[in-house]
Image (spheres, rainbow, N blue to C red):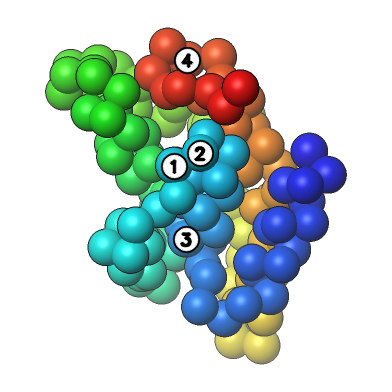
Amino acid sequence: MQHTVQRVRELYRNPKYNCARIMLTCLGEAFGTPADPQSLQAAGRMDGSGNFHAPCGLAAGALLFIGLMGPRSGKNAEDVEKLYYRFTEAFTARFGSLLCRDLRPGGFRPSDPSHVCGDLIIDAVNFTEEFLKHSDMLPTQG
């Protein structure tokens, strides 16, 4: 967990990393499957759905990771969809919402720094790593 805290802090200080890219990067590192450039590009505007303040980039990044890893782990589309549902349900139960505007501390103000969600990012990355370790979807590092 301490590695996750340090890594998240390092990434959220980098203006190239939004919540979705941080989640995708941390999960890739945790499970030994680094995100490829195309996936990182795809995650580039997933933070609140391109600033619409809707789906949280943390949840979107996790779902992107699950979608990428499912086929690599030999799972079919139905298996991946079931894990999407289980993850979405668990994330909502743990954090209270899937919406960026609901999860972001204090909502949105023009003066906010880009990564005001530091503690939430750490909690969500740790939560997602644990969730995935207990799923039958993903390989764990030995």
Relative image position of residue 2 (x, y in whole percent): 83, 44
- In the displayed structure, 33 sits above or below 142; it is below
Q: Which residue is mark 4?
A: 135
Which-is-in-front pick, marks 2 and 3? 2
Q: Which residue is mark 1?
A: 33
Q: Which mark is residue 32?
A: 2
SS class, disc 4: loop
Which-is-in-front pick, marks 1 and 4? 1
Q: Which residue is mark 3?
A: 21
Going from the N terminus, do you reach mark 3 or mark 1 first?
3
Going from the N terminus, do you reach mark 4 or mark 3 first?
3
The alpha-carbon separation of the residues under discs 1 and 4 comes to 16 Å
On-image quarter of the N terminus: top right
Q: 105 left or right of 21?
A: right
Q: Are marks 4 and 3 in contact (CB under 8 Å)?
A: no
Going from the N terminus, do you reach mark 1 or mark 4 first?
1
Quarter occupied by residue 126: top right
The alpha-carbon separation of the residues under discs 3 and 1 comes to 14 Å
The alpha-carbon separation of the residues under discs 2 and 3 comes to 16 Å
Three-letter residue code for mark 1: Thr
The alpha-carbon separation of the residues under discs 4 and 3 comes to 22 Å
The alpha-carbon separation of the residues under discs 2 and 1 comes to 4 Å
On-image quarter of the C terminus: top right
